[in-house]
Amino acid sequence: MPTVSGQMMQMPLSISSLIRHAARHAGDVEVVSRRVEGDLHRSTYAEVERRSRQVAQALARLGCELGERIGTLAWNGHRHLELFYGISGSGRVCHTVNPRLHADQIAWIINHAQDRVLFFDSTFLPLVEKLAPQLASVAHWVLMTARAQMPADSALKNLHCYEDLLAAEDGQWAWPEFDENTASGLCYTSGTTGMPKGVLYSHRSTVLHALGQVSVDAMGIGSRDVVLPVTPMFHVNAWGVPFAAPMVGAKLVLPGSRLDGASLHELMESERVTFTAGVPTVWLGLITHMKAHRLQFSTLRRTVIGGAACPPAMMRTLEDDFGLEVIHAWGMTETSPLGTLAHLKAKHAALDAESRRALQQKQGKVIYGVDLAIVDADDRPLPWDGCTPGQLLVRGQWVVDHYLGSSESPHIDLAGERWFPTGDVATIDADGYMQITDRSKDVIKSGGEWISSIVLENIAMAHPAVHEAAAIACHHPKWDERPLLVVVRKPGADVSAADLLRFFDGKVASWQVPDDVVFVDELPHTATGKLFKMALRQAYRDHRLPGV
Ligand code: AMP
């Protein structure tokens, strides 16, 4: 029997619909940003929508065609937000470039994406001037500032002032409607191994992701919230918060370049922030600052921590000492990024506090739109028993199909379905809670057995003298690899290697206890604020373990 069409309105999912909705139904809700100029700028969704239309007009005046990539090198701020909507909403592709990457990688990415215009914050003027001769596709450079802050002269030809470009437009322009599968945004993976790969999001994937994201089992953001994304807009679009907040009409607070503990705490307090999201490293700075000055949060209630494993000790501190609800989440650039979040189910209400915590410390369960599987080395599905680790596969409406410029599909076929191999190793329990045991390249393989670097780091982080810890594989003549712990002590704290290793007694099997500890002043981080384990592995490749 032929199927019958439904008789509902056909309205393509579009990014512009989010800001139009916010302007119409939450037009007076504030968007507050810490500008590179140093001041706090106050705007509203109505104003952001109007200025986004001016951005779209300015792009047309610069001769940008639909579908062209427009690059940004910018912090979290209102102008960046206007670009998100003005670029994507007009049918062009907003390519957020991570300024913390190495200059060569930035040039490579912009060339690969063939960005036509580059918008950048004044912080990055010297970098852009240096890279410009290598960036042949870029026809226009736009400094995201006002006329008064423009440099007297610059090596850049065709350098425009953002506020001048907008002032030349009247905003009399209507958002176009197009196919919801049209490309909207572009992010490159961090590229800690090999060259970065481009993930090209669509309007449909972005809006569906935002719908999933605001639900109570995900970030649970609503119109009563004041949302501060610490995660940069150049790291998977600040995890989608700039789309989710206007969707629900939540006040948005954008912290600019000031991500130190003192600045973040001050901004959260002064703007009465209720919800925030960021990687664990950001919290290290915030916790240290708040403890040193005996501070508390008066409005912040919930935070999503992801991008790297949240150490249980950090979760306990945030919950017990600062009264926050911590939601542990997992995702990746290739998954827009939300995949799983560690919310409890109704059946867990009766669990004792420690068992509940054990579940909340996992990376969590999927939201609708995402599905997970774990497989062995021959791509055979593994059981969901909470203890068998396997390669984590993911599929869903906001999961990448293939990378930009590559026709090769990275997918694995399971019973006729396409699954994306994440490169993570995980267990899944009978209730669907996923726990990352490692990134496959970070697993420590000792005598054929796997040791989870995350488990070792979590234990070390629970020691009162430890500020940050990384566990890496070190070459061993007999066992092939053995764990080495690289540790930053808390200021003024004193702990010896032997004391720290004794702390592992009874917490893991004795053969999993690290062989040695190296104390350092600081650990390397990637451009997205995660531990840069590849650099550590290289630095300690020849470290002599005791007894070798
Ligand atoms: P990126 O694409 O840069 O966001 O990196 C994605 C990778 O970060 C994932 O594949 C994981 O290896 C790691 N990751 C993200 N969230 C978590 C988490 N909650 N726990 C452990 N690893 C995580």
Image: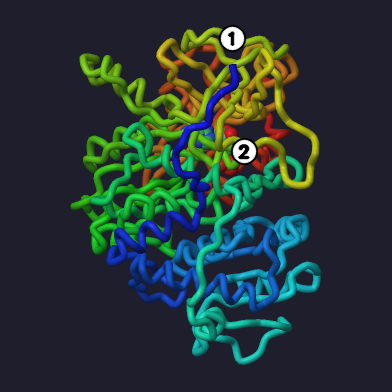
Left or right: 136 as drawn, with respect to 56? right
Q: Secondary structure at mark 1?
A: loop
Q: Name the residue rendered at 37%, 30% in the picture.
A: 312
User: Quarter containing ligand 1?
Assistant: top right
Quadrant containing the N terminus is top right
Left or right: 531 as drawn, with respect to 42? right
Q: Nearer the viewer, mark 2 or mark 1?
A: 1
Against 351, residue 74 (above or below) is below
Residue 220 at what x, y percent from top left? 32, 40
Against 283, residue 450 (above or below) is above
Left or right: 62 as drawn, with respect to 435? right
Left or right: 51 as drawn, with respect to 150? left
Residue beneath disc 2 = 533
Can see residue 531? no
Residue 314 at what x, y percent from top left? 36, 36
Q: Quadrant of residue 496?
A: top left
Colour scheme in the image? rainbow
Residue beneath disc 1 = 382
Q: CA distance from mark 2 to mark 1?
A: 28 Å
Residue type marked 1 = Leu
Against 404, residue 165 (above or below) is below
Q: Name the residue rendered at 55%, 51% in the picture.
A: 235
Q: Quadrant of residue 503?
A: top left
